[in-house]
Image (tube, rainbow, N blue to C red):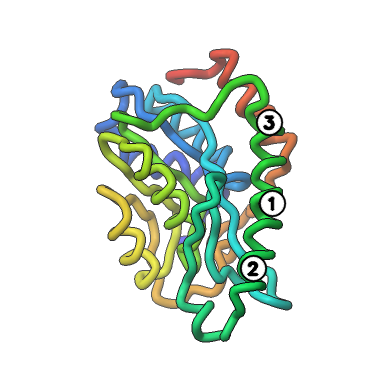
């Protein structure tokens, strides 16, 4: 299936999560691309919207290749690529510190007026538009799991089957609309996969903080 847009994928995910409507789930989008999707899901399920901040660690000279990821507490998840590519500890440390600084800037931008929402004891849905290696989603799920949610759900539009199996080990429930065997990049499964900007994310979070659009 090729999705028209992130918005269409979000509506389809929300349908699959309809049993959580009215139970005030905490819907956490992984910035930036998943935040518009998380807004639609939160609105549909009458839940709360926030972000979970994680960032991939890029390979040397191949920044688009995720060798792992880091959350804003500094916890690092490393993939098998680290061993396969023989990446040094010094490189991993430098890349981790660089991405932590990115996460600090994003937190200051996205939620300057309130602390992150507390997942403890709540139904939490972590949303991404799609996953390739799974490094970022795994880091996000582990970051939330450490805060003791009542139930932890991963929700994505598309992921390869091998990655999906790894995600299922981290979450209590996983919703994935498509799991194609032949997978090159997330964007190939969307007709419109235009970049989401920091300004758009800020606008969405400010709108939800003001109480607009809830429950529609």
x 31%, y 36%: residue: 149
Mark 2–mark 3 Cα distance, whole angstroms, equals 25 Å
Mark 1–mark 2 Cα distance, whole angstroms, equals 21 Å
Q: Farthest residue toward the top? A: 211
* N-terminal-most mark, 3 or 1: 1
Judge left or right: residue 84 versus residue 153.
right
Q: Position of residue 29 (x, y in %)?
A: 51, 41
Q: Secondary structure at mark 3?
A: helix
Residue count near mark 1 (Cα–Cα under 10 Å), binned few <14, some 14–19, many ≥20: few
* N-terminal-most mark, 1 or 2: 2
Question: Residue 17: which disc?
Answer: none
| Above-or-below relation of 213 to 147 | above
Q: Nearer the viewer, mark 3 or mark 1?
A: 3
Mark 3–mark 1 Cα distance, whole angstroms, equals 17 Å
x 49%, y 63%: residue: 135
Q: Position of residue 125 (x, y in %)?
A: 38, 39
Quarter of the image that includes the N terminus: bottom left
In the rendered image, which quarter is residue 41 located in? top left
| Above-or-below relation of 90 to 100 | below
Q: Farthest residue toward the front? A: 90
Q: Which residue is mark 3?
A: 202
| Above-or-below relation of 195 to 84 | above
Question: Residue 58: which disc?
Answer: 2
Q: Which residue is mark 1?
A: 194
Q: Secondary structure at mark 1?
A: loop
Residue closest to the eye, 139 or 40: 139
In the rendered image, which quarter is residue 145 located in? top left
* N-terminal-most mark, 2 or 3: 2
x 59%, y 14%: residue: 210
Residue count near mark 2 (Cα–Cα under 10 Å), binned few <14, some 14–19, many ≥20: some
Q: Position of residue 86 (x, y in %)?
A: 57, 85
């Amino acid at each position: 299936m090729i999705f028209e847009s992130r918005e269409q994928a979000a509506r389809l995910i929300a349908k699959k999560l309809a049993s959580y409507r009215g139970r005030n789930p905490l819907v956490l989008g992984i910035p930036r691309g998943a935040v518009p999707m998380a807004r639609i899901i939160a609105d549909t399920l009458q839940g709360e919207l926030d972000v979970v901040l994680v960032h991939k660690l890029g390979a040397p000279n191949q920044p688009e290749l995720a060798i792992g990821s880091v959350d804003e507490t500094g916890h690092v998840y490393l993939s098998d690529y680290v061993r396969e590519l023989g990446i040094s500890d010094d490189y991993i440390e430098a890349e981790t510190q660089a991405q932590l600084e990115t996460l600090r800037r994003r937190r200051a931008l996205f939620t300057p007026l309130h602390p992150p929402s507390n997942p403890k004891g709540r139904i939490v849905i972590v949303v991404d538009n799609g996953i390739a290696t799974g490094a970022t989603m795994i880091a996000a799920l582990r970051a939330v799991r450490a805060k003791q949610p009542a139930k932890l759900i991963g929700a994505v539009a598309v992921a390869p089957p091998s990655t999906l199996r790894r995600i299922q080990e981290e979450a209590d429930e996983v919703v994935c609309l498509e799991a194609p065997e032949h997978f090159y990049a997330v964007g190939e499964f969307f007709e419109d996969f235009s970049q989401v900007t920091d300004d758009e994310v800020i606008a969405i979070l400010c709108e939800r903080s003001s109480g607009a659009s809830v429950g529609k």
